[in-house]
Image: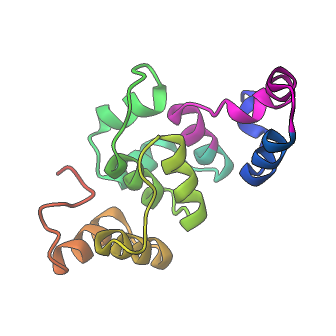
Amino acid sequence: MDDKILKEKETSLLMNELQKTNELSDFLKHNIDYMNTPSIAEYLNKLINERGLKKSKVIAATNLTREYGYEILSGKKKKKYNQNTLLAFALALHLNIDETQHLLKYGNVSELYPKRERDSIIIFAIKKGYTVIQADSLLEQNGYGDNLISPL
C-alpha cells in the first residue's frame, strides 16, 4: 500500500505550522505527504484490508450494483462520488462517525452536520451500526423516502 495513505498529521498541527511559517516553500516541502490525500479507491481498499474484509461482501453490503462497487474500488474511473455513495461504503464498513467524516472529507463531499435533520438520522444509524437498508428504512420513516442512501 502506498505510504501516503499511512501518513497522518492533525489538521490543527498543519494549520499551526502554516500560520507560523515565513516560507511557503519550506512548509510545502516538509508537509506535502500529509496534504496529498489518497484517492477514494486507495482509502476504501485500505479500510477493507485493515478490517480483513472481502471486497465482494462490502460491495454487497453497500446495496450498490456489483459493477459500480468494483468500479469504485478499482479506481479505474477517477470521478467524484456523491455523499450517498460514500455513506453506503461507510455503513457497509461499519465506520464510526469520525471515520465516516474522514471518508467524506477524502471524497470532497459535505460531512454530516447534526443540525440537518437528515444528517442527524444518518449519524444515529452509524452510531447504532445500521446497514444501508436499515438506515434507508429509518430515513423513510422520518419523511426522507425520496432522499435515501441506496440508489435502488
Q: Name the spot of residue 34 as percent of width and height, x first.
A: 75, 36
Q: How many marks?
A: 0
In the figure, is residue 110 to the left or right of 101?
left
Name the outermost residue toward the front. Answer: 22
Q: Residue at x 26, y 40 (%)?
A: 65
- Residues 140 and 132: in front is 140
Q: Is residue 75 left or right of residue 119?
A: right
Residue 115 lies, with reference to residue 133, above or below; the image says: below
> Does the segment drawn in magenta span residue 24?
yes
Looking at the picture, how far across and down is residue 132, in whole percent? 33, 62
User: Hey, which quadrant is residue 142 in on the image?
Assistant: bottom left
**Visible residue check, residue 135:** yes
Q: How is the image coloured?
A: rainbow
- Is residue 58 positioned above or below 37 on the image? below
Q: Which of 104/61 is in front?
A: 104
The secondary structure making up most of the magenta span is helix
Q: Quadrant of the N terminus?
A: top right
- Image quadrant of residue 59? top left
Residue at 22% across / 61% down in the picture?
Answer: 148
In this rendering, does residue 96 appear at all? Answer: no
Side of 46 relative to 78 (left or right)? right
The residue sitting at 42% across, 74% down in the picture is 114
Q: Is residue 42 magenta?
A: yes
Whole-percent x and y of residue 32? 77, 27
Give the x, y percent position of residue 40: 51, 35
Q: Nearer the viewer, residue 111 or 58?
A: 111
Could you say which is closer to the camera, residue 80 or residue 95? 80
Q: Which residues are magenta?
A: 21-46
Locate residue 70: give its quadrant.
top left
